[in-house]
Image (tube, helix red, strand yellow):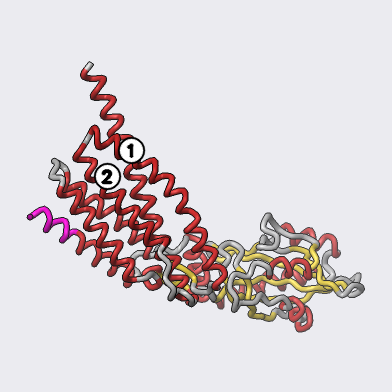
Amino acid sequence: MLKTFIVIFTYLIIVISIYILITNKIVDNSSDGFKYLNKRIEFNLKNEEKLEEKIKERLIYLAGLINNDEIGYDEWIEFIRNHPTLKVGSYKYFLVAHEYVANSKEIVTIMAPPTFAYPNGYSYNTLWSEWSTNESSYEISGDFNVEKNHNEVMLRKGKINIPQTLSYNRIDHDTGQNVVKNSTYVKWISKDGHEGILYIGYYIKNLNAHKQTKYLDLIFKADLAFTSVVLLVTSLIILSTKTKYSIYKAIMFLLTTHLYIFHFLNTDDSISSDIKTEIAQNNDINSSILGVTFLSGVNIFIMNFIYENNRELFLEISSMFGVSILLLFVVIYKSLSKNYLSDLISARITNQLAFNLAVFLNAVIIINFLLTNVFYIYKKKFKK
């Protein structure tokens, strides 16, 4: 009775701790890229005055080399390509150079840093129309548009040796997040008729930040509670075997499964999805069930072996196997009410948790089989 109370008490502590940790955002489970982007934006905003001053100094110097006829066009192009970045603090800011070709009325990218359109390195002498088309094809939310004409605005409003700033929407190359970018720009003109703009930009807002929400807020709460209670019951079944280490196994089972649940529920997800995407993702999860079904067939053979060699362990393993099948039922169960986007998102997240736990439990069965088999062979050999 005391051991049962300890397991149930441990379960309650785990569940309460998970809720407190997630709701109070004590543990940040965002991706490293997302954290880095937000940290960089925070730095930009805190040091914006200093940043602007440094950028303007660099632009006036670089543009002045050709505007004041200190060096020729070809030499100037080579020079800026050899000095592509500005470092402020621990961050680098990239120089971009465009040229307007009057005859063809095209904007040519003389130099630009890696982007989604050209991810492998700096792009040189690329048509802006091609560049912007490729870039905009990587938009990641339906209500966001890459602003393709910001270079045209800069060319029209740009002044020689007088920096100005323009804000517009872009996509961060490293994280794929929709951002607002400030670009300080200046116009350049060579003595032989070449003209264009130089600019250096920095992010001031992550437009996806307000769209990030925890899986805990999106998952079906009833299914989550059912899954958690079933895991508690399984741990009590493990405890009921009354083996030497049954209480430790029961508590370890609770800890490992709920540690994963915590990690899962603390995951950030974007709510800017669409019905077509969610249906496809749900179908992918359902398609993966076939692989787990095959694994379950293998585990039936494994349980037969364990039943013949270790009856106490069989009770633990069979309970885990039963729970894994029950979790798969949660995944394949269809509710007619899931006709709205929010319901589809919740269904996808709920199914993903149930499916992952089913895989985890089947993996535990296989690990137990391997350990039991090794012990059985060793014991048999030792007897000889």
Query: Residue 193: horizontal and vertical position, in percent?
Result: 90, 72
Camera-side residue of 46 and 26: 26
According to the picture, the residue beneath numbered tag 1 turns out to be 302
Q: Please name the predominant secondary structure of the magenta segment in the image.
A: helix
Q: Are circles 2 and 1 on residues that touch, CB within 8 Å?
A: yes
**Image quarter (top left, top right, bottom left or bottom right) of the C terminus:** top left
- In reply to whether residue 6 is colored magenta, the answer given is yes
- Which numbered dot is residue 317? 2
**Point 91% across, 70% down: residue:** 192
Camera-side residue of 15 and 311: 311
Q: Is residue 107 above or below residue 287?
A: below
Amino acid, disc 2: Ile
The crowd level at tag 2 (other Cα within 10 Å; few <14, some 14-19, many 20+) is many
Q: Is residue 214 left or right of residue 54?
A: left
Q: Secondary structure at mark 2?
A: helix
Q: CA distance from mark 2 to mark 1?
A: 9 Å
Magenta region, residue range: 1-10
Amino acid, disc 1: Ile
